[in-house]
Amino acid sequence: MSPRGVAIPDVRERLFAAAGRVLSREGPTGLTNRSVTEEAGCAKGLLYNHFADLDDFVAQLVLDRFAKVAAEVAPLPGRAGRGDVRENLARAALVLLGANGPVIAAAALSRPGAAERVGRAWRDGAPGPGAVEGAMTAYLEAERGLGRLSPGADCPMLALALVGTVHHLLMHGHAGTDDRPELIRRLVAALVPAPEGGSTAVPPGGE
């Protein structure tokens, strides 16, 4: 337990990490001020020194996670022409789903106040699923231009379908599908067409 009056570096990240562990272990019902601060090893009042209330904390946790996801997926268009198109997309989608993504999303859904704050922040421009969708659209359009996607591929709709489905999995889960990488790769294979007589993989002599 941190002594009273001693500054804790990166306190927000410490509390967010603690919340992720609590959610993974106990689910949304176990997420309280006390459970988070005890998990973080700090005083009970610390959370309320940095957040208005628990709804604000959960909302900021979700927004922080999506900002990191968006930053990780942002370089995707630069992958155009390298590797396999479907595998590149699957890896980006798995970043969105994430290790703790479903339980963090469930925490937001269980608290209407938090969900409303997240939605409002996204509408105001905070990085969210739209940022991931934009990166995927730009990537698909670049690959289409290189001939690694069908010329008729509707890139914005493909990105919307992929991100929308992954967002559904994030928010609601999918019974009987513990192998997320395999599920996402099946999804990408079903959505993303190869060019006629071609392949989505890098040609011989490429990367």
Image (cartoon, rainbow, N blue to C red):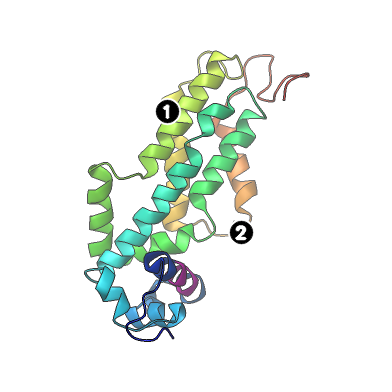
Query: Which numbered disc flags the more N-terminal residue, 1 or 2?
Result: 1
Decide: few, some or many residues near mark 2? Use Cα within 10 Å; few <14, some 14-19, many ≥20. few
Does residue 36 appear to the left or right of 92 in the view shown? left
The three-letter amino acid code for the residue at tag 1 is Met
Decide: few, some or many residues near mark 1? Use Cα within 10 Å; few <14, some 14-19, many ≥20. few
Residue 113, percent from left and from top: 22, 63
Report which quarter residue 9 is drawn in.
bottom left
Residue 154 colored magenta?
Answer: no
Q: Residue at x 64, y 14 (%)?
A: 196
Q: Which residues are magenta?
A: 17-22
Q: What is the chief secondary structure element of the magenta stretch?
A: helix
Q: Nearer the viewer, residue 10 or 201?
A: 10
Question: Seen from this angle, which residue lies furthest front?
Answer: 6
Residue 126, percent from left and from top: 30, 45
Please identify the quadrant where the C terminus is shown: top right
Please identify the quadrant where the N terminus is shown: bottom left
Residue 181, percent from left and from top: 62, 49
Above or below 29: residue 162: above
Labelled disc at residue 178: 2
Q: Secondary structure at mark 2?
A: loop
Labelled disc at residue 71: none
